Image: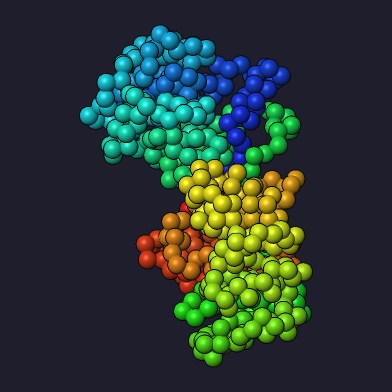
Amino acid sequence: MRRIPDSDRLPHALYRAEQVRRLDRLAIERFGVSGIELMERAGAVAYRLLRVRWPNARRLTVLAGMGNNGGDGYVVARLARAAGLDTRVLQLGKADQVRGEAALSLAAYRDAGGVIEDYLGLPRKTDLYVDALFGTGLVRPVTGPWAEAITALNAQRAPVLALDLPSGLHADTGCVLGVAVRASVTVSFIGLKLGLFVGAGAEYRGEVHFSALEVPAQVYAGEILAAVRIDWARESRLLTPRSRIAHKGDCGHVLVVGGAPGMSGAARLAGEAALRAGAGLVTIATHPRHADWLNLDRPELMVAAVERPEDLDTLIERADVVAIGPGLGRGDWGRRLWERVRGLSHPLVVDADALNLLAESPGAGPDWILTPHPGEAARLLGSATAEIQSDRLAGARQIQARFGGVVVLKGAGTIVHGPAPRVPAVCSDGNPGMATAGAGDVLTGVIAALRAQGLETEAAARAGVCLHAAAGDLAARAGERGLIATDIIAALRTLSNGLAKVDR
């Protein structure tokens, strides 16, 4: 079996649906690649992938829609039938109303002896389904028999190969348009779709493969990316080997400000994560109630009791980066410390309750990294969490425009959005096990440590997000359920020294 073109190494460029349509038109109009040829290539790539991925599959069912995605499905069906697979095509919408290249593909399937059936429900037995219902042009909720077919597809147990994008998933935002196919594998063509990596994309896409369909490289030259996909395999190159004569002062001093009564653990997690991510020195400025014992089992952490805002002054003078928010609280103690820190010229990492206090009294900062989860992001923008999640990239962009600096919008497909003209980044590492108390505090410490070691603001945010996510993936090898924040910390040292690779 031939190797799948371009599929074992995903590109980092991410595109919106409109951009991919432009790339498609440019390949046709300027470089003479016909639309039907692109369809043939897409179907052939998908067919080769399914034979590699499911070599024992003998019964194939293709769900075909009315557009070019359905046309791709007809190519898959024709090739599978020619190879002797028991192949059925279930058409949603009237076959005689299919137009353009899809109609040519449908006719070729019929000419080869294939039979087209109207969709009346899924077959009782099949080894594999091909989702060829909708392409990237879907923008309204799925209804009627299409919704019924997708619901039935999700309820059965056979694997599903989605062509280009799981049907029902918005190509740009990753939102589910009423109902969407839960694919086992998605093979994306020409340009990798942004929606596969943001919103609910991670929940529905399954394993992702890609083929450029031999489109000439010149086609891509004039298109500004919608976003760039980042992962630790790429970002780890920013962590160069240390000098043989380095000392702790060369590796940066992080000051963590937080830990109101009852919330000391958050500050402790951020501080220990900063140490494990390579900071030479870490001081935790915390409430006097627990300052004496906060570092009993981690003596490498320095701890200072802070009662009044002015108690911070000497600590700030010694620090290279200040991380504020973990366990800070919104009481009088936390508010006064936030007001002391927010106007500093130091690089800042702002998280948790510091973000909530910022939302109450907005202002812009030139050299800070804001790390909201969706709820905090909604408070920063005065909107609802659901609105943020409906278009995460737009939410990150709005926060950055309003508050400046670099924004890290946490969640599945964490987004890093810096000032223009830099392209926003979407992290493709990470797993659901990281949905656990304290994981965000660990991220704060990691980003602060990398910033303290000399990475510029956006680079520290990108590398920190990916290191944190990859550490979560390494920890998840023992299982996602029950993973805790300290498991992530334990993996940081191994990954940041290149001593392990995570392949998920």
The residue shown at (43%, 64%) is 436
The residue shown at (58%, 70%) is 325
User: Image height check: is 470 above or below 87?
Assistant: below
User: Image height check: is 72 above or below 233?
Assistant: above
Q: Is residue 231 visible?
A: no
Q: Is residue 481 visible?
A: yes
User: Image height check: is 264 above or below 208?
Assistant: below
Image side of residue 366 versus residue 202, left or right = right
User: Image height check: is 307 above or below 481?
Assistant: below
The residue shown at (62%, 81%) is 285
Q: Position of residue 216 (x, y in %)?
A: 68, 28
Image side of residue 120 versus residue 291, left or right = left
Color theme of the render: rainbow
241 vs 68, nearest the viewer: 68
The residue shown at (68%, 85%) is 311
321 vs 464, nearest the viewer: 321
Q: Position of residue 253 (x, y in %)?
A: 70, 77
Q: Position of residue 468 (x, y in %)?
A: 55, 63
Residue lying furthest left: 124
16 vs 215, nearest the viewer: 16
The quadrant in which residue 55 appears is top left
Q: Number of labelled discs?
A: 0
Q: Position of residue 474 (x, y in %)?
A: 48, 63
Residue lying furthest bottom: 292
The quadrant in which residue 357 appears is bottom right
